[in-house]
Every structure is written in structure tokens, then in C-alpha cells.
Amino acid sequence: MLRAPDMALVQPRPEGVIHHSDQGAQYVSNRYTDRLVDAGIEPSVGRVGDSYDNALAETINGLYKAEVVHRLGPWRNLQAVEMAPLEWVDWFNNRRLFGPIGNIPPAEAEAAYYASR
């Protein structure tokens, strides 16, 4: 479980980062929360059964289900199942034109933001 925050920590990030999760045992363990705190990330744990507590993640999950799972599934083999989320996340971050940021991909907007700092 420590790989996820470690992978995120190598990316540039703004001040005041919050890691939000459900109340799963892996997210409230001392080792996991200590790793977040050591990295300057504020741990945040939602309420049991409250999907609105993590609305952004739930929105992304809904988009993924609508655009990939329901449209492209079922898959015929494990490799296809493993590739589907990788391809969608790549498209979502690197090729999708997003109106609120000037019809450019989110990764391009992020790169421009950090280049201007």
C-alpha cells in the first residue's frame, strides 16, 4: 500500500495536499499515516458508507464505468482487463480536451502551471 503515496510523491504538487480515503484498515494503519505525515500530506478519512464524502473520486469512478466498463466490456482476457484502465487514464490525462482549462489536455495545463512557477 505504501507504493501509491510514494509514486505520488515523485510528482510536483502544490502545498496543502490532502490524501482522502475510506476507512479501510490499510489507510488508517500507523505505518501508512506516518508515511503521509512525513511527506507533508494531510491524511483524511471519510465516514463509513458516505460516498459524498469523497465526491471527486466517486465522479471519476462513475465516468470510468460509463465510458469504459459499460461501453467496452466484457473483456475476453486478463490482459484486456489490465490494459483498459491504463489506456483510459492515459487518454483522460494526456489527450482529452477539457473545456474549463482552454480545451487542452489536463497534463498540458499542469505542465504549463509548473513551468510558470
Image (tube, rainbow, N blue to C red):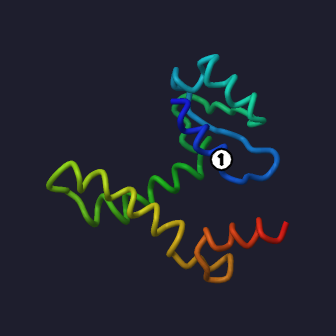
Q: Is residue 11 above or below residue 1?
A: below
| Quadrant hosting residue 98 | bottom right
Query: Relative to residue 80, is residue 36 drawn left or right?
Result: right
Q: Residues within 10 Å of mark 1 (few under 14, many from 20)?
A: few
- Locate residue 48, reporting x and y percent: 55, 28
> Vertically, is 95 above or below 64?
below
Say which residue appears at 46% left-offset and 52% top-offset. Answer: 61
The residue at 82%/48% (across/down) is: 15
Residue at 51% in and 75% down: 96
Task: Check disc 1 and give the amino acid type.
Answer: Val
Q: Element type at marker 1?
A: loop
| Residue in the picture at 26% in, 65% down | 72
Mark 1 sits on what residue? 10
Q: Is the residue 79 above or below the residue 96 in the image? A: above
Viewer-proximal residue among 63 and 80? 80
Closer to us: 70 or 103 = 103
How many marks are shown on the rendered structure?
Answer: 1
- Classify the position of the C terminus by image quarter: bottom right
Residue 39: image location, x then y, percent: 74, 34
Q: Position of residue 78 (x, y in %)?
A: 21, 48
Q: Quadrant of residue 83?
A: bottom left
Residue sticking out furthest to the right:
117
